Image (spheres, grey):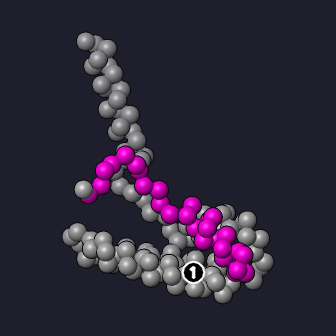
Amino acid sequence: MKKAILLLVIAISGVLAVQAQGGGGGFQRRTPEERLKMVKEKLVDLNLDKDQTAKSDSAFLDYYKAQDKIFEEMRAAGGAPDRDAIREKMMKLAGERDDKLKKIYTDEQFKKWKDTIEPTTRPQRGGGGGGNN
């Protein structure tokens, strides 16, 4: 019995420690600059020149700032978000970003971005659930 109580106390302490460090509950969104840094690490394979890098950075930074604006509007509106409306806005934003990137990258670089790199930039969803049946 004492072992069970001790294990329970240790487990609860661990959960509280993780939440106190920001690992539980709330989700901390990265800044546009942090997200730009992450995507730049993935763009190394494109071998961009200085001009392409500067223009690409600008396109991604604009994209991430616009995303944040949409999320901020969503939070300000309160209530349940309209997922379809948000998805539509995000798809439009991604299309605008890709239009800019097409003008910056070569055809080969853009293809590599779309086929190989872009899929790795999307948030990963946990599997296992059945969704809405």
Mark 1, other Cα within 10 Å: few <14 / some 14–19 / many ≥20? some
| Apparent side of residue 41 relative to residue 19 in the rendered image (left or right) | right
Q: Residue at 63% x, 82% y: name it.
A: 101
Above-or-below relation of 48 to 125: below
Above-or-below relation of 31 to 132: below
Q: Quadrant of residue 111?
A: bottom right
Report the magenta residues as a range: 105-132
Q: Residue at 68% x, 84% y: name it.
A: 104
Please, which residue is most extreme toward the left here?
79
Q: Quadrant of residue 107?
A: bottom right
| Residue named by callout 1 | 98
Q: Residue at 75% x, 75% y: name it.
A: 48
| Apparent side of residue 64 relative to residue 2 in the rendered image (left or right) | right
Across and down, in percent, residue 90 comes to: 42, 76
Quadrant where the C terminus lies? bottom left
Q: Amino acid at mark 1?
A: Asp
Depth check, front residue: 98 or 48 = 98
